[in-house]
Image (cartoon, rainbow, N blue to C red):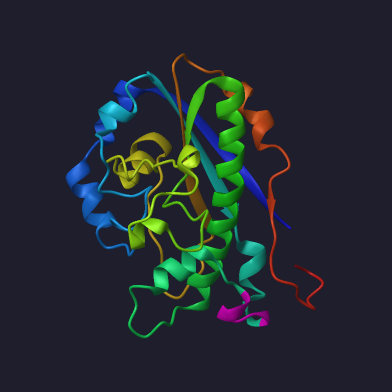
Amino acid sequence: MIKVDFNIKCFTKEELNIAYKPDEAYEGCKRCSNYNFNYSCPDLPYTAEEYLKDYDYVLFVLAEIHTESIQEHMENWDVSDFPSRVLTNHLKRLDDKEVPLSSAVSMYLYNQIKDIMTERLLLMEADLDVLGLPPGSCTRCKDCLKEIGKPCVHPDKIRHSIEALGYLVSDIYRLFFDKKLGWTKGKLSDTIHSCNVIFAKEELNVDVIRPYLEGITLTLPETKDPYI
């Protein structure tokens, strides 16, 4: 089991606007195979201002997955041990269809925390009258029906990431968490981050959110190594 830590901070939506840089954010989105082929991704039918008009406060719930215990045992696995929808989407735009093991592991863990947090955020919405935004594109379905021009089968569960709304995540990490986004090719990062966002109509105490984050752990493929 891999433990997940959470770093939670609350700001006003007005403070968040310093990171609203849609031109830069969408340049990154356009490099993704999901751009304009996933209902959660740009090009969106409304602006961030329209989508978030009812909310004045924002909580960042930064999930932190520490990988030190994994790195020394990487020889126990290969890429095929770490299937994920995030990896499948990533491979769509690669000609050689090959990725380093470190990337496959990162996407595998990221996909897990994304799926867990997507459901936890929906619980928060039901209980607290908030809007919860998980990271990245929606991976609820194996293939988004937008690719073939059909309507979404889960329209009530479509949520857009903060990037899809035009906010620059690298600025959010740097300005609000004093962290710099980055990675080393072929090496598993010591900490994998996942930025979940909650918009609220009124200021929320961080302690109200914490019960929804209890008991979250991630799993790894089975291995004969007893230390994992």
Quarter occupied by the N terminus = bottom right
Is residue 69 or residue 94 the one in the foreground? 94
Is residue 198 or residue 173 the one in the foreground? 198
Q: Which segment is the magenta one?
A: 76-81
Picture coordinates of residue 213, whole percent (x, y): 65, 37
Picture coordinates of residue 108, whole percent (x, y): 56, 64
Identify which residue is drawn at 58% across, 60% down. 109
Asked if residue 20 lies left or right of residue 116, the reply is left
Asked if residue 206 lies left or right of residue 73, the reply is left
Residue lying furthest bottom: 96
- Based on the displayed image, in which of its 4 quarters is residue 29 positioned? bottom left
Quarter occupied by the C terminus = bottom right
Identify which residue is drawn at 41% across, 63% down. 183
Q: Does the magenta stretch include residue 77?
A: yes
Up/down of 121 relative to 31, above or below: above
Picture coordinates of residue 54, whole percent (x, y): 37, 19
Picture coordinates of residue 200, whole percent (x, y): 46, 21
- Based on the displayed image, in which of its 4 quarters is residue 55 positioned? top left
